[in-house]
Image (cartoon, rainbow, N blue to C red):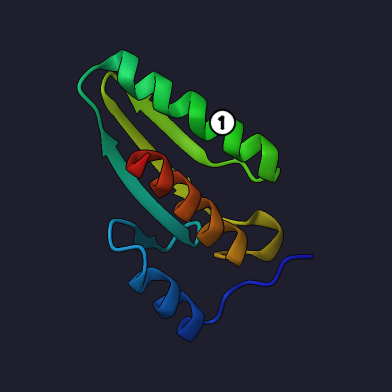
């Protein structure tokens, strides 16, 4: 089982993820991504899907035209875990590539 991060660990992790925000219900982190058009947003989602499948850690997400909203939480841990932080970093790295 994966452990839920405590308050101090959450604060440290979010300091390195300035675009992500803490959410309460369910406890996790979220970020909105805006792209030039639907095709760019969908291509991004496909790349995230490959990361998620490889990590066996799948986001809650939605897409409306050029917008992708992602929520990361670890249901087994009852909230935010290191797996979510690692996935957020991997997602952010896709944008830097």
The residue positioned 34% from the left and 40% from the top of the image is 95
Q: Quadrant of residue 24?
A: bottom left
Front in this rendered view, residue 72 or 36: 36
Give how far across and how far down residue 15 sits, in percent. 34, 73
The residue positioned 63% from the left and 64% from the top of the image is 78
- Quarter of the picture containing the C terminus is top left
The single residue placed furthest to the left in the displayed view is 36
The single residue placed furthest to the right in the displayed view is 1
Relative to 39, does residue 7 appear above or below in the rendering? Answer: below
Relative to 67, does residue 12 appear above or below in the rendering? Answer: below
Relative to 70, does residue 66 appear above or below in the rendering? Answer: above
Dot 1: what SS? helix
Along the horizontal axis of the image, is 48 left or right of 56?
Answer: left
Give how far across and how far down residue 27 sits, in percent. 49, 62
Give how far across and how far down residue 12 sits, in percent. 42, 79
Front in this rendered view, residue 27 or 16: 16
Give how far across and how far down residue 94 sits, in percent. 42, 40
- Quarter of the picture containing the N terminus is bottom right
In the rendered image, which residue does mark 1 sit on? 49
* Dot 1 alpha-carbon crowd within 10 angstroms: few under 14, some 14 to 19, many 20 or more: some
The single residue placed furthest to the top in the displayed view is 39
The residue positioned 61% from the left and 39% from the top of the image is 52
């Amino acid at each position: 089982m994966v452990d839920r991060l405590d308050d101090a660990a959450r604060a440290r992790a979010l300091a390195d993820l300035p675009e992500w925000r803490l959410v309460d219900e369910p406890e996790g982190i979220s970020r909105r991504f805006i792209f030039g058009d639907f095709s760019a947003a969908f291509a991004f989602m496909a790349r995230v899907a490959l990361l998620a499948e490889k990590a066996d850690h799948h986001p809650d997400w939605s897409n409306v035209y050029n917008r992708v909203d992602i929520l990361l939480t670890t249901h087994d841990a009852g909230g935010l875990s290191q797996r979510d932080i690692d996935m957020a970093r991997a997602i952010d790295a896709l944008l830097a590539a």
